[in-house]
Amino acid sequence: MMASSSTSSSSLCATFTKSTANPSSSSSSSFCWKKNECSSGNNKNKNISLTTKSNHHRHHHHHRRHNRRRATVVVATSAEATGEGDGLILQRGKGELNAFDSIAIGSPIVKYFQSDDDTERWVMWYTGRREVGTSGNNSEENVGDKITAATFDHDKSLTSGEIGIAVSEDGIVWRRGGSPTETYRTGGDAEAFENLSVDVGAVLYPNNEDWWVFDTAHVSVGDVHMISSGNVSGGAGGGIYWMYYQGGDKEEVDGVEGVRTRPGLCLSQDGRNWARIEGEHHTHAVLDVGSEGEWDELCIRDPKLLLAGPKDMRLFYHSIDKTTDVSRIGVATSKDGFQWQKNSSGFILDAGPEGSIDDLGVKSPCVARIGRNEYVMFYEALSSKHPGKSTICVAKSQDGIKWERASTPALVFGEDGAWDEGGVGRPYVVPMAENKLRLYYEGRSDANGLGVGIGLAVSVGDDMFSFVRRKSVVTAA
């Protein structure tokens, strides 16, 4: 999704290839878009009651204990100004005490909010995975019954584990924490501490309250939006945070736990304390995997929300064919965000033709609306030319169902020796001033590997389909 920002109109041109369920029937066409103006507004969180009108949407609050110590601060240097670089802005907490992301980090969801005095506040929700057998601060007081993500070794191909939050003043230099949540102090005396601090670190863990629910093994953030809804009591003019996420259970698939994933929903007043909402499925997921033989019977992953219009909410996701390992992208629609209906025609974007940049699969869609009836999708592409090394590509659509691929990728994996030489994926795009776009992404050091850092690339000129990495603010471990 694209976070709101004030932008001016500009031409956005590229060559795209039409895509249908049958990738062999394709042709090329050229077109030019106009990027619409987006209004940022002042998104101020209110003190809002998290209640729902439907009785079956019972919610569970996730409470956290706070550690009032300084969080990890990534400091930029004068050499890290704008310009082409290797892109790394946030790395995993390898070797750090209490790190919930010591093994892997990824799936960045970035938003920024502007106050009345034009002060910017950036927030990133992201996914981390810790070492097996570790649980952050192991004291009974801090662990309680919440931190259980690393008590067993789930599917090794997944970054998914716990969900955390980091903060920034510019979207480049980030303050991160561990598990339990840590407090980042900005300054001032002890009496003013609460007004000068912000919590960072792990904010959502796997669910261990009920054994039958869909997210007992691991969780990973899909998307976060601040929404005012008739289904949620939000007070006068208020909005609350909606988080769609994927959760995995402990059911074994081919001898591996955590492979089957479904999407869930959490609500929050502050983006840190979350209440799980019970979905329609008996596991409390908002959407079930497909029946046997359907394209999405194995899993539903990386759910991304598009607010396409009044009572028009769309959840884009990908699934993996359990026999061929080919990934495809699908969509479900909803009027209220609670009850979802899958596209009746099946997946909406298939793997490309043999020899193409995405012939082994497409995944992790990030979709935004451009103009009245135009959509753009950034997605992760897998190619037989570079096995295990993913790139980020772009597609365009008039209706959000039939897509045309761009002729060139938006961002390729890093050069040999780079921190992200193993692949780039899970894109998230934020529009900026002067017709620029920021592309946040997950980077991997090894082919088919887990995320080792979060990167940032910026668009080139007025071309929203070509990106260069920004100068890094951290050094790869």
Image (spheres, rainbow, N blue to C red):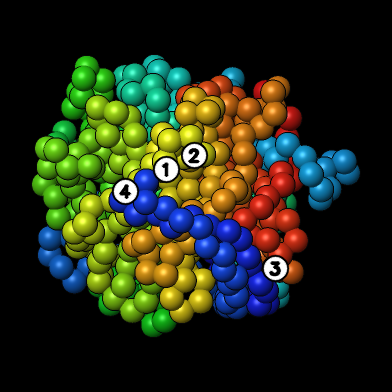
Nearer the N terminus, badge 1 or badge 4?
4
Q: Distance between the residues labelled 1 and 2?
A: 6 Å
Q: Are marks 1 and 2 in contact (CB under 8 Å)?
A: yes
Between 446 and 131, the one nearer to me in the picture: 446
Between 288 and 359, the one nearer to me in the picture: 359
Residue 197 lies, in percent from the top left, at 61, 52
Q: In which quarter of the image is residue 134?
A: top left
Task: Inspect the image, locate mark 4, and give the three-letter code of the amino acid beneath it.
Answer: Asn
Q: Distance between the residues labelled 3 and 4?
A: 35 Å
Q: Are marks 3 and 4 in contact (CB under 8 Å)?
A: no
Disc 3: which residue: 435
Task: Inspect the image, locate mark 2, and give the three-letter code of the amino acid beneath it.
Answer: Ser
- On the rendered structure, is 298 left or right of 413? left
Q: Distance between the residues labelled 1 and 4?
A: 9 Å
- On the rendered structure, is 289 left or right of 43? left
Please rate how many residues cluster around mark 1, counting C-alpha atoms within 10 Å: few if below 14, some from 14 to 19, many from 20. Answer: many
Per the rendering, the mark at residue 22 is 4
Task: Inspect the image, locate mark 3, and give the three-letter code of the amino acid beneath it.
Answer: Asn
Q: How far apart are marks 1 and 3 (CA)?
A: 30 Å
Disc 1: which residue: 352
Per the rendering, the mark at residue 425 is none
Nearer the N terminus, badge 1 or badge 3?
1
What residue appears at the point 45 percent right and 20 percent down from the top-left corner?
131
Between marks 1 and 3 in the image, the one whose residue lies nearer the viewer: 1
